[in-house]
Amino acid sequence: MSSKSILKESSLTFLENYLNNASPTGYESDGQKLWMEYVKPYVDTFITDTYGTVVGIINPDAPYKVVIEGHADEIAWYVNYITDDGLIYVVRNGGSDHQIAPSKRVNIHTKKGIVKGLFGWPAIHTRNRGKEESPKISNIFIDCGCGSKEEIEKLGIHVGCVITYPDEFMILNENKFVCRAIDNRMGGFMIAEVARLLHENKIKLPFGLYVTNSVQEEVGLRGAEMITKTIKPNVAIVTDVCHDTSTPMIEAKTEGDTKIGKGPVITYAPAVQNNLRELILTTAEANEIPFQRQASSRSTGTDTDAFAYSNGGVASALISLPLRYMHTTVEMVHREDVENVIKLIYETLLKIENNETFSYFK
């Protein structure tokens, strides 16, 4: 299967709609409905849970269960405090970056619909030239054009309303996908494409495949923590993003040497089961899929950890998509990497044998 042929026009249409739709942590359900609609022709059934994780299942009656997983949520803000003169202070919902906030437009999600606002910032002329104050959580604020707290409340805004950025999908130089929330709706997209390819190529897997789009990763892997107890999988292959370390101000000696366009990133970490990782590596080599390697010291910081340490231990591995400018509104990935992650997960599934234990003690 050529990686060049993987993404169809209908795939890219779904990707754009899926990325542009806001799915902040805790409020993923609208995006999950879009994902379910796209995946529905390629799976036998769905399960959902209380907090909104969605799983498309192929061969639901099979006793041996393999998960492929991404997460659906994006970082956001909450309204935390409204001043008497109608300005809004915020707290994070996930790892939102305070430094990129000044002069960004925002969508405030209310029961009356989306209210527009912006992060204000003092003009350059008025800032202390000797010692400029940097943006921080205590001094960034949202202006909705209101002059009082009462005006803000009339718009339907209250403490606890969630706030996202409106930035939308674009393609740079024909092969770079750019958007907010590529971390990690691109993961949800890639596992959906694996399900599509299995269906279109009429592949009959000998095990149950659980195509899992988890919620609440950005606040501590919580959706994966919940759903793995429901599924009780034997194997989990997780896909998330990792850093392109080739851009300025990032130290590759510390962060590792990974770059967009050079292929999927395969992680070495305590949570990664060595035999499963080796299967992925040999699959990449056999199919001439370019790949990179990364080491994680204690935890991967992804849903891999939640699956690995659940249910008495689940053989788990991580295939990452290198990304520039994580947790900004201009996250960037390379189309070829996206295609190669899809291809690597797909080909690895074809190599997993039914009832394989991945035991070190055979």
Image (cartoon, grey):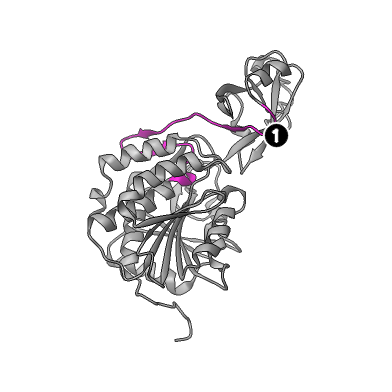
Quarter where residue 355 is shown:
bottom left
Q: Residue furthest right?
A: 84
Classify residue 194 as left or right of residue 359.
Answer: left
Q: Residue furthest bottom?
A: 362
Label 1 crowd bin: few (<14), some (14–19), many (20+), radius 10 Å: some
Classify residue 267 as left or right of residue 82.
Answer: left
Residue drawn at point x = 55 percent, y = 27 percent: 107
**Residue indicated by mark 1:** 137
Residue drawn at point x = 49 percent, y = 45 percent: 183
Residue 256 spot, x, y in % from top left:
51, 56
Residue 242 spot, x, y in % from top left:
49, 51
Quarter where residue 266 is shown:
bottom left
Residue 317 spot, x, y in % from top left:
47, 65
Q: Tell me where the magenta segment starts and ends, as one range.
A: 158-185
Q: Would residue 88 be seen by someone viewing this image from the given angle?
A: yes
Q: Which secondary structure lies at badge 1?
A: loop
Position of the C terminus by quadrant: bottom left
> Is residue 286 shown above or below 218?
below
Q: Is 256 inside the magenta-drawn segment?
A: no
> Is residue 227 shown above or below 116?
below
Residue type at tag 1: Ile
> Is residue 86 shown above or below 60?
above
Quarter where residue 275 is shown:
bottom left
